[in-house]
Amino acid sequence: MLGFSVRESGRAKRLSIKVFPRGRVEVVVPKRTRPGEVREFVEAHRDWIQKSRESFAAEHTPEPFVLPRQIRLDGIGRQFMVEYQPQRGAKTVKYRSHTYKVVLTGQTSNERLCVNALKRWLTGLAKREFEPQLRALATVTGTSFKTMHVRGQRTCWGSHSSAGTISLNYCLMFLDPSHQRYVMIHELCHATHMNHSKRFWNLVGKFESDYRRLDKDLNSCWKRIPTWVGIY
């Protein structure tokens, strides 16, 4: 049996499979789907999954996991050095952020704790960078939102809930500004159309004429995310 993860979705009407560039397989299922049904579905698509993995492997050189010594964030045009300072007896890892450096202190021999600390830093930085940009674009598009969250979604760059909450993926920080801006416009336009109808895309096109290319690009942009982030 192939290794895979399962994600329940209230929006899913049928089972679907997504293979990520570094080989991770995710099965999206409607709520209350039986485990046996999921296994059968994956087994029926075994050949397709294997071919997809082989295709990605030919295009992307496998990258071993390694804690970063520097982090480049194209979305905001900044690069940070990462410094690790072990502390004897520490059971956690904390971070301090400087203009161009992130310092991790504590049990820095624990890779998981270091990654979690870096994700907390990345989340906080993304919140500070994204919110003013999102509010400015809301004014431009004539749309609104109630709150903004930053998360590390594994399968989407952003979302807009019916309650008016926009969630943006901190991984957008690794993309170029044009893709970052497009995702924000896309989610803001869902305030008017909570679907992907023709009217929705016409609205998106009013504020981003190149939306078709940008939207298509996002499917392959996951390969830009460093291995340590663990999206795959």
Image: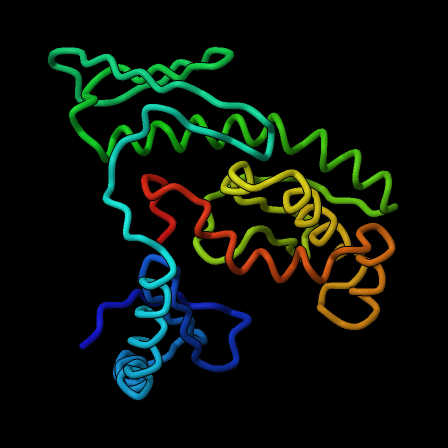
- Occupied quadrant, residue 54: bottom left
Give percent across and percent down for residue 108.
Answer: 21, 22
Residue 41 occupies which quadrant of the picture? Answer: bottom left
In the rendered view, would you say 73 is above or below 59? above
> Which quadrant: the N terminus?
bottom left
Residue 161, above or below 4 = above
User: Is 150 placed above or below 69 here?
Assistant: below
Residue 208 lies left or right of residue 175; in this view the side is right
Q: Residue furthest left?
A: 89
- Residue at horizontal 87%, vertical 55%? 206
- Of 222 and 185, which appears nearest the observer? 222
* Residue 201 screen position, x and y as percent: 78, 65
Q: Is residue 96 above or below residue 65?
A: above
Q: Residue at x 72, y 37 (%)?
A: 134
Rendering coords of residue 2 (x, y %): 22, 73
**Which quadrant would residue 40 be assigned to in this image?**
bottom left
